[in-house]
Image (cartoon, rainbow, N blue to C red):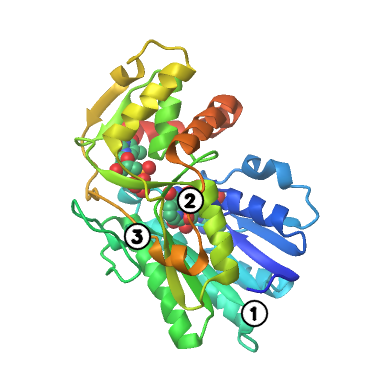
Amino acid sequence: MKSSKRNILITGGAGFIGSHVVRLFVNKYPDYQIFNLDALTYAGNLENIKDIENAANYHFLKADITDADQMKALFRKYKFDSVIHLAAESHVDRSISNPKIFVETNVTGTLNLMEAALGIWKEDLQHKLFYHISTDEVYGTLGETGFFTETTSYAPNSPYSASKAASDHFVRAYGETYNLPYVISNCSNNYGPNQFPEKLIPLFINNIIENKALPVYGDGKYTRDWLYVLDHAKAIDLIFHKGNKKSTYNVGGFNEWQNIDLIKLLCEIMDKKLDKNEGESETLITFIKDRPGHDKRYAIDAGKINKELGWEPSVTFEEGLAKTIDWYLENSEWIKAVVSGSYQEYYKKQYT
Ligand code: NAD
Ligand code: TYD
């Protein structure tokens, strides 16, 4: 994409990754008008982007991507020339207890956006882009060795990953059938500030702060490849501007950890930060019933984005984890606000 005046729609910008992407674009590209569209579900929080809410090139649109008419009306009104689509239901455990909303938001919502985009773009597809943000979970699970590449077959195992896989297929199909200019990236597990405390790292940080049990699924010997959220945002910036159209990019941290080792490291750092006795947080570890369909190992080969676009993670895991923990310790009001109300019901249902 050329760097000039643009009207960019970013969906899901009040969520975890989206808020970092919105901030990066608003600050880095004053000539771009950035429209953050978000339904503000339990996972969306305008506090995440409070610092940029008054920027001249920032606009917030409270809207729901499952509403096709609303999407068409917004595209007609604001004439977006590109979309960075992050809005989604994003938590595997919620998809196991309530799969339908994952189809509605992740599949139908994506279709609605592409339809609305084509509605105003079809006369002139030049300098237009539909950038779909996806996950490595679409590839299913790995054994002890090997990596997911851009050509690995899709084999999703959870309702969440199935819904993301379906949306990826639809984006590709819209590219082939209607010539929609698209790009897709599939990223590994993100961590960092502003992540909702239902995902592993923020949940465990919060539980250590509150002296609550740390619920480890199964034997804890599941492997994930962790990437600091700002490095993902930088990859999105590069792919948006320089990625090849009608292609996909894998983004990963070159940073594999077995859950149990990561959790022990987290406990060790938290003991120091909270002035606890050595080993105190580890006593909170509780092994619980495994997640159904639990993928054993994810690991990304990020060679393509590295070679083509020169991207690599800039933050080491030690630095990223320290920054993340500090952020949660310094933002107790944010945590208090998001763990009230419906979170308590979710927690009870999930863990007791
Ligand atoms: P998140 O759950 O923190 O945020 C999702 C945002 O989407 C929220 O602000 C929510 O309000 C909004 N949203 C949900 N339904 C909506 C709807 N119907 N209409 C409009 N807005 C709606 O998610 P996240 O972790 O920031 O993930 C963002 C994207 O990145 C998702 O597409 C996810 O699949 C993908 N992804 C996430 C990770 C990860 O580790 N978190 C890794 C790879 C890819
Ligand atoms: P999660 O953060 O939910 O991300 P994903 O399932 O999308 O990879 O989980 C990361 C890993 O941590 C995964 O193997 C499941 C595990 N996990 C637990 O052991 N306990 C928990 O309470 C949660 C939320 C996750």
Name the foreground residue: 142 vs 287.
142
Which quadrant of the figure contains the C terminus? top left
| Amino acid carrying mark 3 in the image | Asp
- Please, what is the three-letter code of the amino acid marked with disc 1? His
In the picture, the disc for residue 301 is 3
Amino acid type, callout 2: Pro
Q: Position of residue 85 (x, y in %)?
A: 54, 63
Report whether the residue tagged 1 is closer than 8 Å to ligand 1: no
Q: Earlier in the sequence, mark 1 or mark 3?
A: 1
Residue depicted at 38% across the width and 73% down the height:
169
State the residue at coordinates (51%, 76%).
Answer: 244
Residue 222, relative to residue 62: is it above or below?
Answer: above
Left or right side of 262 for 14:
right
Q: Secondary structure at mark 3?
A: loop
Read off the residue under disc 2.
313
Distance between the alpha carbons at the discs numbered 3 and 2? 13 Å
Q: How far is the residue under mark 2 from the one under mark 1?
A: 28 Å
Marks 1 and 3, how far apart in space? 29 Å
Residue 127 x, y percent position in the rendering: 64, 79
Q: Determine which residue is flagged by label 1.
A: 127
